[in-house]
Image (cartoon, rainbow, N blue to C red):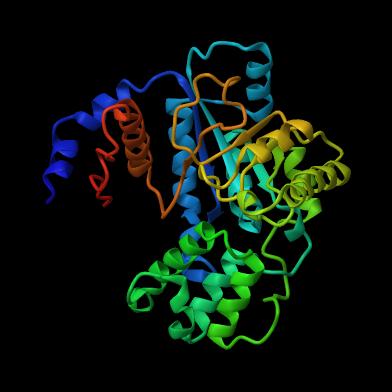
Amino acid sequence: MDYKADLFKYSGLGWLLWKLRPQGLYGFNYHRIGDPGETQYDPNLFSCSAEQFEAHLKFFKSNFDVISLDDLMTIMRNNSPIKDRLAIITFDDGYQDNFNLAYPLLKSANLPATFFIATDFIDNPLVPWWDEVAWLLKNTEINHQQLKKWQLPINWYKAPVTEQIRIMLRFMKQNHRLSMAEKLAILRKASGYQDNELTISESLFMNWDMLREVLSNGISIGSQTCSHQILSHLNEAQQEQEIVESKRRLEQQLDTVISAFAYPVGGENSYNEITTNLLRKSGYQLAFTFLHKLGANLLANRFELPRFSVDNHCTVRKLKFNVCRNLLNQKLAPFAKEDYLSGLYQDK
């Protein structure tokens, strides 16, 4: 076993880091709940099973003061100092399993959460771009020679399909020279898939009635654009359309003020100064990222609020480890760029 893993497991380092974790806002974000083996789309998008999510909720209740989006807005309005370890639970994309599996467990635990919605996928049988990439890789024979110009890792197509999907999506997110539509068209051609868009008989995503129900039962709603495009890849007019129209549509359908936003993809290169200026101009009060930091000074960073991404059938033990790892890296960031605990965690 790696000596670092031994150190973390047996030295009490993990216990100490957890006990000493500072006060502040801890954001925990989920995408899908359920069994990744049952989907024909991206299996890497499943955060955990329903049973694991139920365990997470008990863990949050025992270790944090779980707050709602309204609570967070009040803290920010009052510029109140955070004197506790606060947690906020969020879901991105708006998949139906959020309603069918996560929502009943949240309701039973009497815990608030926020669902961020990309409005184009509501009542719409289109498959989003990331799931289409996964479907093509799982269901067609890709002519990898046609993708040579993309400079993907050598022999990427020989990796297990879940890793192929990760590699391809990483490229799609990082390459901004081509639009997402252009990249999808090239991938469809390489796969021999003839249709312009992949469609299904039923939507993967929640509909308006589902959103109205959760909104009336302790769940807040925020925007994640219209079509979940990576905003930094768009020009200002395109960004404004995504930001303004999604807010307008949600407010029109749900009869509520939409003040919160989550950046699609959410990394530091997925948005820019144009994006944050447009959010302010459009009436948003805050925005969430996937920057793994502790939210301490909320007003100074209200358009870069951090969240931990809960991924890959995450257990409670792994959840604790990820928090400790990122807090340690944050403390040591001025001294080194290394992820000090990378690879230490070995889940059972």
> Residue 115 appears in which quarter of the rendering?
top right
Q: Position of residue 224 (x, y in %)?
A: 68, 47
- Horizontally, is 273 left or right of 38 in the view? right
- The residue drawn where x is 55% and y is 71% is 133
In-image side of 21 versus 291 (left or right): left
Q: Residue at x 31, y 20 (%)?
A: 20
Horizontal and vertical percent for residue 327? 35, 30
Residue 43 position, x and y percent, is: 48, 65
Q: Residue at x 42, y 65 (%)?
A: 167
Instruction: Examine the rendered structure and indicate whether residue 180 appears above or below residue 106.
Output: below
Asked if residue 40 shows in the view, the reply is: no
Residue 322 versus residue 63 in the image, above or below: below
The answer to whether any part of residue 119 appears in the image is yes
Relative image position of residue 55 (x, y in whole percent): 44, 42
Total numbered circles? 0
* Residue 15 relative to residue 70: left or right: left
The quadrant holding residue 62 is top left
Residue in view at x 69 percent, y 16 percent = 77
